Amino acid sequence: MLLGSALVAISPAPALAGEMPVSGVQVVAQADQGRVRFSIPAQGLENALNQFGRQAGLQVTTLGALAAGLRSPGVSGTFTPAEALDRLLAGTGLTYRFTDAGTVALSMLPQGSGPVELPPVNVQGRRGTETAWGPADGYVAQRSASGTKTDTPLSETPQSVSVVTRAQLDEQKPRQISEALRYTAGVRSEAGGLQMQHDGIQIRGFTQYAGYLYRDGTRETPGAYLGFHAPEPYNLERVEVIKGPASVLYGQSSPGGLVNLVTKRPGETPVNEVEVQGGSFERKQVAADIGGALADRVSYRLVALARDSGTQVDHVDDNRAFIAGGLTFRPGDDTTITLLLDHQRDDSLYLYGMPAAGTALSNANGKIPLNRFLGEPDFDSTYLNKTSFSALSQHHLDEAWTFRQTLRFSDHDYDSKTLYVTGLQANQRIANRNVYRRLAAARVFTADNQVEAKFETGPVGHTALAGFDYQHASLDVMTATGTGPTLDLFSPSYGAAVSIPAFNSGNDQKVAQYGFYAQDQLRYGDWILVLGGRQDRATTETYNRFTAGRTEQDDRAFTGRAGLMYQFDFGLVPYVSYAESFEPVSGTAFGGKPFDPETGRQKEIGFKFQPKDYNSFITVSAFDLQRQNVTTSDPVNTGFSVQTGEVSSRGLEFEGKAGLADGLDLIATYTYIDSEVTRSNGTDLGKRPVQSPAHMASVWADYTIRSGDFAGFGIGGGLRYIGDTYGDSTNSFEVSGFTLVDAALHYDWNSLRFSLNAANLFDKENLSCRSSTGCTYGAGRTVIGAVRYRW
């Protein structure tokens, strides 16, 4: 190569729109030149050079035809930029020399002759292209499909959408989805305390129950009838949160919003890593993520994980076996087909909760310990087996028309038996317990078919979307409840005989939803208008196994959405939007009339700010959200309900993320929510919903040294604040708020990364209550050490 000890300088050209400036940067290839940590896998030369530019703090254009078909062996380790370029070009038949501060001359190396110099190529700025379904650049995502079902910049989506990227997941090491959302505005993660089998999440004051998670745009399970399910974060490229009603695109859902999980997918860029973890509560975990090109126009991905771990609660494990495989076929330039298969097996327990007396409230006998197990070690058990197969396809019919389809079939088996506390005896020491047995199975099929068209009508540009989605689930659920033995909460003696009651309740259900939706994203100059509407039909057929009775419910709803934005040249985008949601309600009123669906309506105003010369994104929003048709007690017919209830949630949100060129990543959030039961015939009228704080805030920073003798060392830390909440629907007692501290250390050395993460570093008590017997401690201090090897 032509480096030697010669002076080599790179002075980047001005950044393009939306890029980070690197003004006045000069890289000198001499012995004392600063060293930088590089991690660039083997791949196409053009992509490798783009990654080199980002990691070196420089910016590099593609090389056009010169780089076509060439592959780089990659580079991993700490080198000067010049040394890294040597390795990136090895075997490509190319060499280089810098002719001046901003120009590099590339030369071919024909066999048997000296170098043949090619015309100069200017080194300028351009980031690698991000898509809504692929990796993002660090913590800051630029695009998402969750808010529009099209590949749209977040700055052009007139609704608050948060994205947790793979880079953030890798650095914070969440054990479950709710932990991944700890630093997301508008979200109270871990609302149900420590739960390894269930992601307790509140969005804008409304609880997201089991089954509300979406994956790749379609619903994971049909509701809470099945049991609990916690997806594996290691298999995800992104975790995205839509704030507020989203029924126009997704059908029946909570008015607070929804969480959409974006799966890791096969790609041509090689991905090869193995990670081993160990930590608190005898945690042992090994995981692998391997993928890349398998053949011409065929790529693969294999993700696997095995975990053997305890938890902070005695006799409660967190064991998991997970494997996922994927193949992507590109039969032509315009067609992509991806097949995904995954299997998950969990062995853990759902924690039903402790009495408030002894946790949130005083107890004459003292405090119930955080690690206290309230079941029977030889009796309680919960097993979940889940297998799913997905087919995702996209075909560009021409420059204007695109067809996309997502199909998924999943098979769920859930088997659980447990004891839970129903109340305390007069001495506040002895707890009464019930036995609960649940056996459930489900077969779920979902399909989403979309046609997208891009065209113009005069000065107005359109991205129009029309779609039909379908969900169908067959559920078989059997439950049994009976009286169990008592337990001394302060000096437990386990081993009591437990009689498993006979099944006394059970249903076969068929749940289906059909939805037709249409959306148009219109652009006129700097104005953006988004309009959407949807017609849904949701049916439920239930067969009672014990009474042989059959019931049918047929709900229909139309939901709409509108949003208006204006883009200023300097990156500020104010917006205003309106959105609706609906959600079927099971049961009947007096006289047998089925309940109407609950509805949600939200008005939102705010702005998004994405400075064109910095890798950052800020969203500020104010919202007014109502949930209507809520069931409340019938004042005339005792024992029945009427749909006159209403819950309101109004608030403010701030979320900012930034990835700075010097290795500093930042997250800051603040949420204020004023939630209230505004209509009710019960004692909850005028009260605040349980587990919903008025104030939440968080801040996280991670700094990695990019050059010098300590290149590769990094340190991170964060604060999470959750305000006071009420512990029951009548607001009879308060649960104190808390501030938790997280910390992280990491070091990159060649192809290895060593990391140490501590959540709740100072072991601060944090508690969540939903009733007088439903209080659960949040995670205490949890330390995870990991070693990751990439090649």
Image: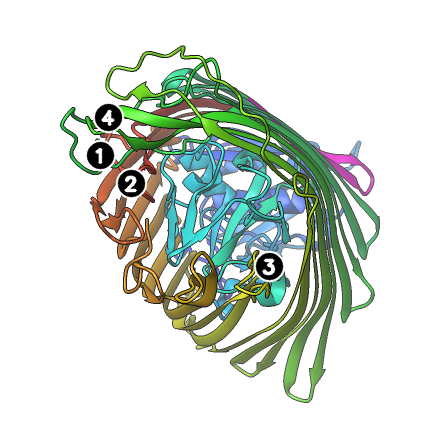
Q: How far apart are the alpha carbons under marks 4 and 1?
A: 9 Å
Q: Which of marks 3 and 4 is nearer the N terminus?
A: 3
* Secondary structure found at label 2: loop
Residue 375 part of the magenta-drawn span: no
Q: Position of residue 438 (x, y in %)?
A: 57, 31
Q: Are marks 1 and 2 in contact (CB under 8 Å)?
A: yes
Q: Give the range drawn in magenta.
A: 289-306
Q: How far apart are the alpha carbons under marks 1 and 2?
A: 8 Å
Circle 3 residue: 145
- Decide if residue 205 is in sight here: yes
Q: How far apart are the alpha carbons under marks 3 and 2?
A: 41 Å
Q: Earlier in the sequence, mark 4 or mark 2?
A: 4
Q: Where is residue 518 in the image (x, y as percent from the top left)?
A: 68, 72
Front residue of 580/99: it is 580
- Decide if residue 303 is in sight here: no
The secondary structure that dominates the magenta segment is strand
Q: What amino acid type should be assigned to the residue bearing mark 2?
A: Ser
Check the picture and name the quadrant holding the N terminus.
top right
Q: What amino acid type should be assigned to the residue bearing mark 4?
A: Ile
Name the residue: 59% across, 54% down.
Answer: 130
Q: In the rendered view, would you say 201 is above or below 494?
A: below
Circle 2 residue: 772
Circle 1 residue: 357
Q: Nearer the viewer, mark 4 or mark 1?
A: 1
Q: Nearer the viewer, mark 3 or mark 2?
A: 2
Q: Position of residue 167 (x, y in %)?
A: 48, 41
Q: How far apart are the alpha carbons under marks 4 and 2?
A: 14 Å
Q: Where is residue 280 in the image (x, y as percent from the top left)?
A: 36, 20
